[in-house]
Amino acid sequence: MIHRPRAPLLAAGLVLVATASSAQDSTSSTTDEIAKYREMLEDDNPADLWVLRGAELWKTKRGPKDASLEQCNLGLGAGVVKGVYAQLPRYFADTGRVQDLESRLVTCMMTLQGLSLEEVTQRPFGNGSEEKSDMEALVSWLVSESRGLKLKVPTAHAKEKEAYEIGRQIFSYRAGPHDFACATCHSQEGRRIRLQELPNLTTAEGARKAYGAWPAYRVSQGEVRTMQHRLYDCFRQQRFPEPRYASDVITALTMYLAVSANGGELQAPTIKR
């Protein structure tokens, strides 16, 4: 029988434990510092500029019908904005579809203002410089009108149940050149990309924390980004085909995430890296 010296093995084990502990402490420290950084900026969140512009756009008459959006029905009655985002996506009888906030705004712009689909969707996202998106401003303001409220997205209608189920399947669908799914990055605890924590969206806690924080001002892009853009960017990073703006695919995935986050408090607009 060969007897191996225990001291070197013990020393090696202690080094591994110390290294793992150091890495964990470093990760925790970085996360804490990022949280403090965001906290410091919250009082002067640049997203407030988008909110103010969105409030004005809601009242501005535009399009062939020279009408504002003040009679837009976002689910709680024509012109009601307080609390609507906390109950979206939802089924709308006039379109026969489940719609999220952005797809519903597209409907209102077309029906109330007479704008075409091409006109409404030609610039859904700002480019980080002089080209700003009216849609991102409108969404920022409307979401701010639900800040502090609890999510209670409805699931009673058959179409709402269907959208949720489709969204659940999309979340776990693996494809593309990297064989990725949303779940690849967002179904486990403690995962990160660079300094960015990846929330576990399969848990109520993770879904509430993540969903309730969008839209957000992204410091790295100099723009407010909505949930629509966040999901669009996830598809891009997975190397999936580019989803059409306000498509049923995005709405279904939003429905799944929103229902998973039900009961959570809306904090948006927030600030992100």
Image (spheres, rainbow, N blue to C red):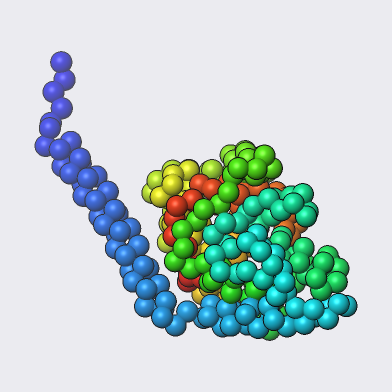
Instruction: Please provide percent x and percent y for residue 20.
Output: 27, 48
Identify the residue at horizontal 29%, vertical 53% (top origin).
24
Compared with 34, 222 (above or below) is below
Instruction: Please provide percent x and percent y for residue 71.
Output: 72, 72
Q: Quadrant of residue 188?
A: top left
Q: Quick check: can you spot residue 127?
A: no
Compared with 253, 124 (above or below) is below
Label tally: 0
Compared with 218, 197 (above or below) is above
- Screen quadrant of the N terminus: top left
Instruction: Please provide percent x and percent y for residue 104.
Output: 71, 61
Relative horizontal placement of residue 224, taking residue 2 as reference (left or right): right
Instruction: Please provide percent x and percent y for residue 125.
Output: 68, 70
Identify the residue at horizontal 80%, vertical 71% (top origin).
112
Q: Quick check: can you spot residue 195?
A: yes
Compared with 50, 79 (above or below) is above
Identify the residue at horizontal 88%, vertical 78% (top origin).
64
Furthest residue in direction right, as rendered:
64
Pick the front one: 215 or 172: 215
Furthest residue in direction front, as rendered:
77
Pick the front one: 187 or 111: 111
Identify the residue at horizontal 66%, vertical 64% (top origin).
77
Relative horizontal placement of residue 256, taking residue 159 as reference (left or right): left
